[in-house]
Amino acid sequence: MSVQQIVRAAIEIADREGLDAVSMRRIATQLGLATMSLYRFVSGKDALIDLMVDAVHAVHDDNGGAVPVDAGWRTRLEFAARREWGIYSRHPWVLRIVATPQPPVGPNVLADVERLMRAMDGLGLDAVTMHWVAIAVGAQVQGAALLLVNELETKRRTGRTTQQWRSDKSPAIRELLDSGQFPMLTRLFEEQEDVADINAWFEFSLGRLLDGLEVFVDGRAGVDSRTGVEGRAGVDGRTGVDGRTGVDGRTGVDGRARVDGRAGVTGAKATC
């Protein structure tokens, strides 16, 4: 018997039945051992959960291998975000453990944060700003994953899919829409009556977040070249980012806001 075998058994139970089903007694039963014998390897359930989370962060990869060494910062962030999304898709119970200001701090969890920060290295951002970018990307993934995890958990408990729920609710929804009070929702219902794919929505929301970060990064380059502000972009809690700074009011062909080619700023205020 080893710690790895205990952790592996616990993960199997959590994946199949949810985190609440995991207990030292249940794991011991699955492994054919006495419950108290597990405490020779793991101090308790809390320590076990930390090991479980770190284990799935170590092995999970939905991206077909490592990100190319010459990839740009956006590709690197996409890679890290999709990797995290894959963890929640395979192991829905992980979200409730890591989506907190006090997550497990095992080496593989920290490596994921390091990966996000490293993606922004070399762009003139200080460590605090790079960490804030990592938090923003993680929050985007976790927010979208909440829908995914709730859908998976509901299907596991009840056997009902979101499509089945929508079919049951469609007559009531149609009756409300026919009242004429909700023209935008009526338009949506007519254009896409079926349930939107959560994975597609995640990809859309991730792309828009990265578009915003692109404006921020390009804006920093404009500030540095025009005003001579030190290339180390900082986060100043007193000033924040001017909502108008660095963004041309027009949109690009792909619908994303583009940085004004003149310098990336609309006035003398720097983006901090």
Image: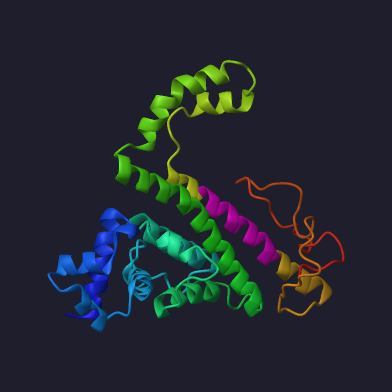
Q: Position of residue 265 (x, y in %)?
A: 80, 62
- Residue sitting nearer the eye, 138 or 204: 138
Q: Look at 75% across and 55% down and name the residue there.
A: 247
Q: Is residue 163 above or below residue 233?
A: above
Residue 217 colored magenta? yes
Q: Is residue 233 above or below residue 85?
A: below
Looking at the image, the residue that sits furthest to the bottom is: 40
Q: Quadrant of residue 133?
A: bottom right
Residue 10 in view here: yes
Q: Position of residue 166 (x, y in %)?
A: 42, 30
Looking at the image, the residue that sits furthest to the left is: 32
Tell me where the magenta segment starts and ends, as one range.
204-218
Magenta span dominant secondary structure: helix
- Residue sitting nearer the eye, 109 or 43: 43
Q: Look at 50% across and 62% down and name the residue there.
A: 99
Residue 199 in view here: no
The C terminus is located in which quarter? bottom right
Relative to residue 193, is residue 239 drawn left or right?
Answer: right
Relative to residue 202, is residue 182 drawn left or right?
Answer: right
